[in-house]
Amino acid sequence: MEKNRIGLSIILPIYNDAAAVKRFLPELFSFTGQQEQACEVILVDDGSKDHLSATYNQFKEQLPQNTALRLIQFSRNFGKEAALTAGLAQAQGELVTMMDADGQHPIVVLKEMLDLMHTRDVDVVAAVQTSREHESLLIRTLKNGFYHFMQDTHRYELTPNAGDFRLMKQRVVQALLQLPERQRFMKGLYAWVGFSTLYIPFQASPRKTGKSKFNYFSLFELALVGITSFSQRPLRWISRMGLILSLLAIIYGLYIVGDTLFFGKDLAGWPTLAAGIMFSAGIQLVCLGVIGEYIGRIYEEVKQRPLYLVDKVWDSRDQK
Ligand code: UDP
Ligand code: MG
């Protein structure tokens, strides 16, 4: 198979999901086998502890004629965003898609995206989750609030509930790879690069095996990365808050002076003083925290560490 004539690349980021991958791959291979163009499946093992590589040969045996398989193994867990970026850097297909390995992204939707890509003049077809019933009410509310907050600029828009399940032309992939940031909030990066995008609704299937790798803590962390890399609103908020508080302090100061001069009240009131000091100290700490969050991100970026480290690579094309 010629390497440079691949029609479709499918990237699967995998972290401790070997059981799910074993279920999903045969289904995926039967789909790629039906395609006219050559396909490649890129598995990115994001430092799994369940030895996915041990089953590589078993996967390889199931490969249809027109499909190549590549397994990239990270030296440790670097996170889904890094795994996706590694997959994108390797993908040679004219069209590239990313799917969760746990079977939550249905292959019929991929078919639909391919059809649309061939009939419409667009560069990206992205799947948007219509309902997130499988998630808890709290997670859903927090995610809604987050998307609401992220509508920060009129130049590009973060489409709520559009995730990594999307089909892109190679030139969009190249554009994404040009963005050098270490802390990759992919949903923001997709919005940032732009290109004509068609959104189609889809319903995520329930996870077949295992459980979600994202808990409240990691989602919060991801949201912070998203906010600090795509919005300067918190910084603006704290400077405005500073202005308002200073203004209030001046008004209060004038009031006290007037009270003493004109009405001869003595200057009692240490509780007001104590509360005022504590309040302003608290506000200052919060503001420092917000600034610190941004400085932390700068620190991460200037270190210029690689986004991920690849330990081993297996490729079914190597022996051909
Ligand atoms: N994943 C990954 N690295 C991580 C966490 C998750 O590569 O650190 C993969 C995981 O194996 C799955 C996909 O990312 O294929 C989505 O993860 P998950 O299903 O846990 O997330 P959810 O569907 O709950 O958003
Ligand atoms: Mg999932």
Image (cartoon, rainbow, N blue to C red):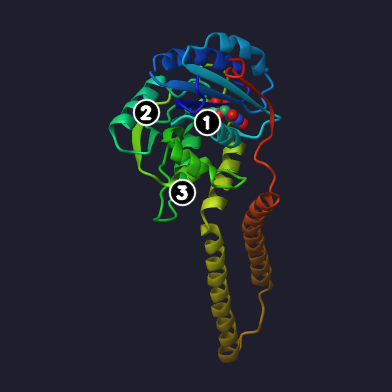
Give the label, 3 or 2, closer to the camera: 3
Provide residue 2's location: percent of width, then percent of height: 50, 23
Q: Is residue 90 above or below residue 108?
A: below
Nearer to me, 58 or 3: 3
Q: Residue at x 46, y 26 (%)?
A: 5
Q: Amino acid at mark 3?
A: Trp
Nearer-N-terminus badge (1/3): 1
Residue appearing at x 39%, y 45% in the figure: 195
Left/right placement of residue 154 relative to residue 284 reads left
> Which image quadrant shows ligand 1?
top right
Which residue is the site of mark 1? 91
Residue 286's image quarter?
bottom right
**Residue 308 vs residue 220: left or right?**
right
Give the spatial CA distance, label 3 vs label 2. Answer: 23 Å
The residue labelled by disc 2 is 202
Q: Which residue is mark 3?
A: 192
